[in-house]
Amino acid sequence: MRCRQGWPGNRVYGVCVRNKPDRETGGDGHKNNRSKRMTNETWGQVREELIKRVGKNNYTTWIEPLRLSHLKNGVASFEVPTTFFGDWVSRNFADHIRGELAVAGSPVERVEFTVGAVSDRAPAARPAARAAKTARARLDGVDEVTGAQLEQRFTFDNFVVGKPNELAHAAARRVAEGGPVTFNPLFLYGGVGLGKTHLMHAIAHELKFSRPDLHVLYLSAEQFMYRFVQALRDRQIMDFKELFRSVDVLMVDDVQFIAGKDSTQEEFFHTFNALVDQNKQIVISADRAPGEIKDLEERIRSRLQCGLVVDLHPTDYELRLGILQAKLEHYSNQYRGLTMAPGVLEFLAHRITTNVRVLEGALMRLFAFASLVGREINLDLVQECLSDILRSSEKRLTIEEIQRKVAEHYNVRLSDMIGPKRLRTIARPRQVAMYLSKQMTSRSLPEIGRRFGGRDHTTIMHGVRKIEELMAADGQLADDVQLLKRLLQS
C-alpha cells in the first residue's frame, strides 16, 4: 500500500491505494507512473482554472471530489462517488472541464464518469452512498411519504368543493392520479385556512394509496430549509442532494418562507431544475402568487410561474355553509343527543368569514359547550359561547375604506363614487362598492345608503342584487370582486 501524494484530490480524499500493474506495459511501473504524473499535473492546472470559472462553492461541491482516472484517446475519464453525482457534473460542468483541458493542451472529445469501486472510493463518498441507501430505505418502507406528518383527516373525501376552490381541487385530483406530468409545477396559493394544505395532504394520501411505487416527499418550506442547513453544518450536503433528487413527487408547503434565504433559495432552485429535467412532479403552495412573494429570486419566481398557478379564492357563503353541514354530521355522531335549532349554521356561515379553520373550530366549540351544559345549540348559545370569535370576526372595515379601494381599482374619483353621476363607468364600480359594503361590514342598508351620498336603502339593495346577478354570468367581474375582497382583508 502507498498513500497517493501530490494528487489534486489528496486534500479531499487522503486515501491509500494499491499499486497495480499497468495493463498496457505488462507491469512496467515507470512508464505508468510517468503517465500518471503528467495526467495529474494537467488536471491540477485545469482545477485551478475551474475554481475561477464555476466559483468556489460549486468547485468544492462538484469538482474537487472528481478523480481523474485516465486522459487518452480523446476521452477524459473520471471516477465519481455516486451515479447521481456523475449525472449532475456531466449536465452542468462537462463543457467547462472539456474547455479547460483544451486550454491546458489536452483536448478531448468526450468526458465520461464512472462510479469508483468501493475499495478505491474516497471516505467522503461513503457517507453519501450510505445516505442515499438510507433515504431510499425510508422511502421504500411502510410509509412512502416522508417529511412532514400527514393529517389523516385531510383527504379528498373530506374536502368540500365550491366555486372558490373547484379549479384547485380539479388540478390536485389530476396530480393525485399519478399519470404523466401535464403541468409542472402545480402551484396552489391563497390566504390562511382556504384549503391549500388540505389539498397537499390529500394528494399525498391518494398517491400513497393508488401509486405505492412512487416515492413521494411532502414537507414544509421551513423543514426543507432546516434539512439544508443541517446538511451544511454536518457536511452532508451530498446526502441532502441524493435524497431530494431521488423522489418522484416533491411537495413543498408554504414556499414563501424561503424568500430572502439566499443559500436555501439556490439549493431549492437546483433541486427544482433537477426534478423537472427528470420529468418528476412538483407541487408547491404559498399564501400568495409567485409574482407577489417579496424577496423571492427572479429565477425561482419564473420557474414557479411556468406551470399551473391556481388561486384558492376566499370562501363564499355557500361554501362555508357546505363545510359546516359536512362537519355537522361528524359532530352529531360524536355528541349524540344534542339538537341544533334552525338557522344556527346559516348564522355562522354569514358571520365567520375569516377562514375555514376558525369556522370549524367554532362549530366544535359549540358542540363541546352544549354537551357540558346540557343545552340545545341555538342562537342564544352561539352568542354566549362564541362571543370572542364573533367579536374578532366582526369586520373592522369601514365603508370609506371599501369605497377608496374600489375607486383605486377601477380608476375613478372617490367624489364620483358617492356623487350623482350615472355613467356606467362610475355606476358599476359604485354598485361593487355597495355589494362589498353589505358583505364585509355589519352596517345596515340605510347606513350604507347614507355613506353613498344619502341614497335610499332600496337603491343599495338593487346595487347588491345587480352585482350578484352579474357575477354569476361575468367571470371577469367575479374575479375583480374576489381580488378586492382579498385586498380589503389583507
Image (spheres, rainbow, N blue to C red):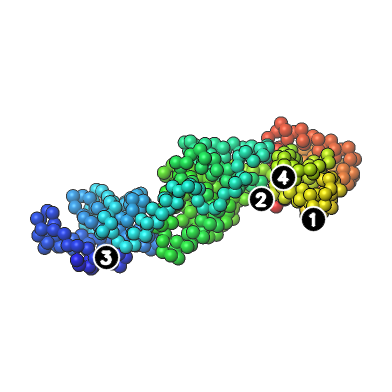
Callout 2: 10 Å neighbours few (<14), some, many (20+)?
some
How far is the residue under mark 1 from the one under mark 2?
19 Å
- Looking at numbered disc 3 in the image, what kind of residue is underneath it? Val
Q: What residue did someone put label 1 on? A: 388
Q: Is mark 4 on a helix, strand or loop?
A: helix
On residue 15, the disc is 3
Q: Is residue 156 left or right of residue 86?
A: right
Q: Nearer the viewer, mark 1 or mark 4?
A: 4
How far is the residue under mark 2 from the one under mark 4?
27 Å
Callout 4: 10 Å neighbours few (<14), some, many (20+)?
few
- Looking at numbered disc 1 in the image, what kind of residue is underneath it? Asp
Q: Which of marks 2 and 4 is in front?
A: 4
- Looking at numbered disc 4 in the image, what kind of residue is underneath it? Gln
How far is the residue under mark 3 from the one under mark 1?
68 Å
How far is the residue under mark 1 from the one under mark 4?
25 Å
How far is the residue under mark 2 from the one under mark 3?
54 Å
Q: What residue did someone put label 4 on? A: 334
Q: Which of marks 1 and 2 is in front?
A: 1
